[in-house]
Amino acid sequence: MDFVTGNLGWIEVICGPMFSGKSEELIRRLRRAMIARKRVQVFKPVIDDRYSRKQIVSHGDQRMNSEVVAAPSEILARLDWRTQVVGIDEANFLGAELVEIASQLADSGKQVIVGGLDTDYLGRPFAPIPDLLALAESITKTLAICMRCGNPAKHTQRLVESEDLIVVGAAGMYEARCRRCFEPGIPKQELLEFARPRLERDSE
Ligand code: ADP
Ligand code: ZN
């Protein structure tokens, strides 16, 4: 962002499906802020401890130390007032309260960079990203590669059987799919696979 005078805060959102490079892009921006000698704090939700409890980790294994929070209000509680740049990963796990907290941070002069899924496993807008997009100064949509056809992919395809909105998982439980290949819910092929008796599958 250019031509900013004084300590004007703002909100940047990086959104897209799983595997699209949101965490990589967030880490890249936060590294650049550190190179510019900005004071940076990084937060992630406690629910996402897939790879590391204390770090944000990309699927390509880029890492950055972070603080773990159970709720958006905890970001305010843990904030060092000298912090200039606030990074938040996996925002889709933090719920609607994040909208108010991110706005407060930006209003008080912080540069807030948020990464998260913009759609859920059924392809629906995934709170709180849609509201953050409306309030942000800058938005970036990252696309992955469709695992079926190789086209740009905007969907996160769930491969396991569950109707819960949040099922934390990585490769094997989800894959990126394009608009054409995405099947809301669980793909029929995978469902059939689950329906087969375990012994039959194991003996292969
Ligand atoms: P996100 O935070 O959006 O889930 P990450 O930044 O963690 O994404 O991971 C992006 C990296 O994942 C890519 O640079 C690439 O190495 C890897 N990757 C694995 N599967 C795919 C895919 N289907 N499309 C694109 N990148 C993929
Ligand atoms: Zn496709």
Image: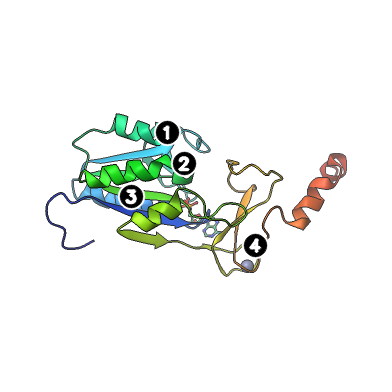
**Label whose residue precedes the other's in the sequence (1 or 4):** 1
What residue did someone put label 1 on? 71
**Label whose residue precedes the other's in the sequence (2 or 4):** 2
Does residue 175 appear anywhere in the picture?
yes
Q: Is mark 1 on a helix, strand or loop?
A: loop
Q: In which quarter of the image is the N terminus?
A: bottom left
* Disc 4: residue Cβ within 8 A of ligand 2's nearest atom: yes
Q: What element carries label 4?
A: loop
**Label whose residue precedes the other's in the sequence (1 or 3):** 1
52 to the left or right of 102: right
Distance CA(mark 3)–CA(mark 4): 28 Å
Amino acid type shown at disc 3 = Ile
Q: Residue 95 carries which label?
A: 2
Q: Which mark is residue 182?
A: 4
Give 56 or 156, whichever is nearer the viewer. 156
CB within 8 Å, label 1 to label 2: yes
Q: Where is residue 64 in the image (x, y as percent from the top left)?
A: 37, 42
* Disc 1: residue Cβ within 8 A of ligand 1's nearest atom: no
Q: What element carries label 3?
A: strand
